[in-house]
Structure formats: C-alpha cells, structure tokens
Image: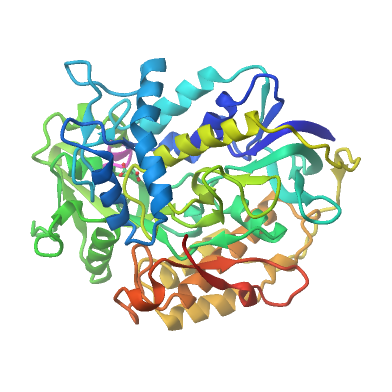
Amino acid sequence: MTKDDVIIIGSGIAALQLATQLNNQLNVRILTKGKLRTANSYLAQGGIAAAIGANDHPSKHMVDTLEAGRFHNDQEVVREIINAAPTLIRNMSLEGDVFDKDPNGELFLGMEGAHSEKRIVHGGGDATGKNMMEHLITKLKANVIIEEDVFAYELILNSDQTTCIGVKAKQSDDTIKSFYGSHIIIASGGCGQLFTYTSNAETVCGDGIAMAYLAGAEIVDMEFIQFHPTLLYVNGETKGLISEAVRGEGAILITDDETPIMAGIHPMKDLAPRHVVSQRIYEFLRNGKQVYLDIRNIKDFTKRFPSITTICVENGIRIEDGKIPVAPGSHFLMGGIKTDLIGRSSIRGLYAIGEAACTGLHGANRLASNSLLEGLYQGEQLSKWINGTKAAHQESKISDSLQHAISKHLTLPDRQLIQETMMERVGIVRNKEDLKKQQTWLTQFNADKIPLDHCSVHDLSRIFMVITASLITESALQRTESRGGHFRSDYPVENDQHWLRRSIIHKYNRGMEKNHEFIKTALAT
Ligand code: SIN
C-alpha cells in the first residue's frame, strides 16, 4: 500500500502540466498504463490556439469556439479559458524553445478549420504535442514518481461512499496494488480506440471514464465525438493524422477525377467545421469514391510538415505526387467526466482533467487546437487548488500487492468487433435502428456487473470499452437531433427548442438493473 498526496492516472499534457506545477513538498505519483512517451498528447501534430495575432482578439476566438461547438458550450468556461490562452502560451514559450517562431522572432501563427484568424501555434512544424511533452518532462522534479505499465482499474471510495481515497491498479505481472491519496486525478484521455478508424494512440480506450462512471461520478455529453476529416487512408486502414494545418496552408479535398468536394457545401469550404467536412468525405467513401488532399500548391511541404511526410513515406505515399488519400476517423471526445473549471468531479476527492473531463469548453464539437490549451489551463488551475488545500485526514485500508486468480470464462467481445460495430452503428452518421441494435448488443455483456479484481488487463480494457461504448450509444439514442459531432440521419437538423444547451448526464448506481435509467438531462449552466 502507498499513500501519496496526489495520484494522477494518465501522463499526457494535462497530467504533466499539473505535476510540474504542484508544490515540491507534495508527494505526487503518476500511474500510466503504457509508457510516458506513448501518451496521446505526444502524437498531437497541431497545435495550440490563442488570440495573439495583431488583428485577433479573445472575443473572436470565443465566437469561433461557440460556433464550432454549436452553442452547446458553457459560455463562462469558454470565456475563462480563451482569455487565459495568450498568457499560458507565452509563459511556456518564455521557459523554453517549444514553439516555432517567424523570422522576426515572434510566434509563428497558422490557420485551421473554423478559425476566423491565424492563431494556431505549432512546435517542430507538426510535432507540437511532442515538443510540449518533452518540455514538461524536463520540468518534473524529484517529488513526482512515474509508474509505467500500471493499469488503474477501480476507484476506492471511503466507507460512506462519499469520497474518493485511492485507486486499485494491476501491475504487469497481474498483481493488484492499492494506491491511496488525498487527491485522485483522472487524466487518462478520451476513447478514440472505440472506433475502427482513429487518430488516437493504441491505449486510448475510455478507461478513466468507465472507471469514474462505475464509482458513481456524473458523465456528460458522451454523444459528441469528433471525427477528424483527414486521416491517412491506405489499403482500407487509417494510418495516422494528416493535420488540418495542411488545409490551413492551402490543400484542398478532391476526388479521383480532381473535382473539389467542399465548394458550395460551406462558406469556409475545406476549412469548414470538422463535422461538416467529415460528413462530406464519408458520403464519397460510402459511394465507393476515394478522396484526396491535394497538396500541390504547398511550398516546402516536407519542411513544414516533417512528421506527416514520414507517416506518408512509411506507408508508401509519394509526397511528390501531391495527393494524399484520406478518410475521417474518431479524434476527440467532447464529453467525459463532468467537472468544474478546477477539475472537480461530482465525487469529493476525485478530479478529471484533459480529454477525460468535460468542462463545457468544447460544446458539441471542439474547435481545432483548443484541447492542448484546455489541458494546460486545467493542469494549472488544479495545481493552484491543490497547492492551496490542506489535506484532510483520510481513511486508507491496509492492503499490499495481491494476486487474484484470473477469470478464464468471461463473455466479452474482442476489441476489433467493438471498434467495427461502433464505427458502423454509432459513427459519423447515426440512426435509431443502428443505435438500438448496438445498445442491445452491448447490454448483453453486462460489463458493469463483472467483478474486476479477477480480470486480466486485456479483459479490463474490453470491459471499459464496452461500458464507454454503451454511454456513447445511450446518449446518441436519446439525443433526437443533430448537433456538432452527433449526426442523426433520422433527425438531421438542430432542434434548439428542445435540445439547445441541454446535456445528457449518466450516473451509475450499482444497485439498479439498467444504466440507462439513470440518464437525465440538464441545462448547461
Ligand atoms: C490537427 O492538427 O488537425 C489536429 C489538431 C486538433 O485536433 O486540435
């Protein structure tokens, strides 16, 4: 048994920003199921948005964020985070050589979809996440212990079930260890791997959200999944992200016979909000047509986009040909564990930051490059809160590393089947019939009733995938309209009268039979 001041589950930008800003006197333990450098944030190509250009203003950034989010956002949260953006970026830029500069030594500002101004800051061309992570890693102090290959799977609550006091985790040899702490933070990312096509790292399966749900935390807005329009698409598989910055630099989407596909669809054409572009590409793919990014008018492509060049070359795509085959894939979850701006969940002692959390910043669809920003903001805010909080005395039960026999006979679908059915029935275009089919299919596994101590890491991962997939499916079924990242062909338009700023919240109660009985709707504050 260990007892720390702060336990952080996950190791992306939000986690590291928090860890580096906590007081040195606090014992901080980071538990990560993979390796420190395999976090999803490490893959982020572009960028981080802030209104720092001469013609820009936070009010413009705010309007763009609300417009992309289809006004489902929490306006106060948007104002607060957008206003903080320039200072957060300048502070990091002053600390190290993280971001790209123009010849005058000013931050180089790029363009991305649905932004009305150039305001995207990049690092290493298209390696922004990696640059930021490496910078934060250099700032970690001796009070922060990092434990890799440790899979957190069950939150521990106090005896009256009101406060989170720790977490159980499986180590690589399947032994169980309980970690106790005064502040338990979930920063384990979203759930991109629930879908066949995704830009997300292998490890991003919705674990933290499922774990918080099983502990009774409120989970919100799960129907809003962002499908990024342009993942590299080779031999029927997606192979990684082709950043929107490529379209920001002038690339356009075309078909085999070189017809541009976004003309006449949206005033911002190829830089329309992501759900608009993704749905358009999806339409072509469904009709058996391939879609390409035409990059022929981008000067020095390989210099501006070194990581993308590498991904293309590794997958047999010749940059000189000027056409990159693309398909949309799941990229970002707008919903998650419901938190306030500090990161507090509905359970005392339990916090969420990064993509696992839902503050209300993104609404129904995230504006490009607002998520690294949110991670930096949340990490900083939560550090201030914890640094200023006197730790209360907490119960902790005595338990050391334990070995439980692993159950051999669980009935669970394999990962690929979960991904395929989610992509097909709960993907870019949804309808009642498909959603019902998926709901029935997922429910049969009773994933929320399986005792977890006897499960292998592989099975735990599938259980959490099924639970998170169920939350998405249930929400998507309930929301009888289309908005942002949630598109229903049977309800193809926004229904402001019933749904504007109304959220679907899930709250689990272990005693009851069906999870979806706990879905309630609430107006966003
Ligand atoms: C991209 O570079 O297109 C992704 C950036 C983001 O999703 O914010």
Q: Is residue 337 above or below residue 502?
A: above
The range drawn in magenta is 311-317
Looking at the rendering, in which quadrant would you find the N terminus?
A: top right
Residue pictured at 24% horizontal, 40% vertical: 245
Q: Nearer the viewer, residue 238 or 30?
A: 30
Residue at x 63%, y 75% (from the top left corner): 443
Nearest to the observer: residue 80 or residue 105:
80
Image spot of residue 13 (x, y percent): 49, 34
Does the magenta run of residues contain 474?
Answer: no
Q: Quadrant of residue 409?
A: bottom right
Image side of residue 489 versus residue 256, left or right: right
Q: In the picture, residue 480 is in which quadrant?
A: bottom left
Residue 391's x, y, as percent?
Answer: 75, 34
Q: Is residue 35 in view? A: no
Please state the horizontal and vertical placement of residue 31, each as a whole percent of the image.
66, 36
Question: Who's the residue at 59% across and 28% down the image?
Answer: 19
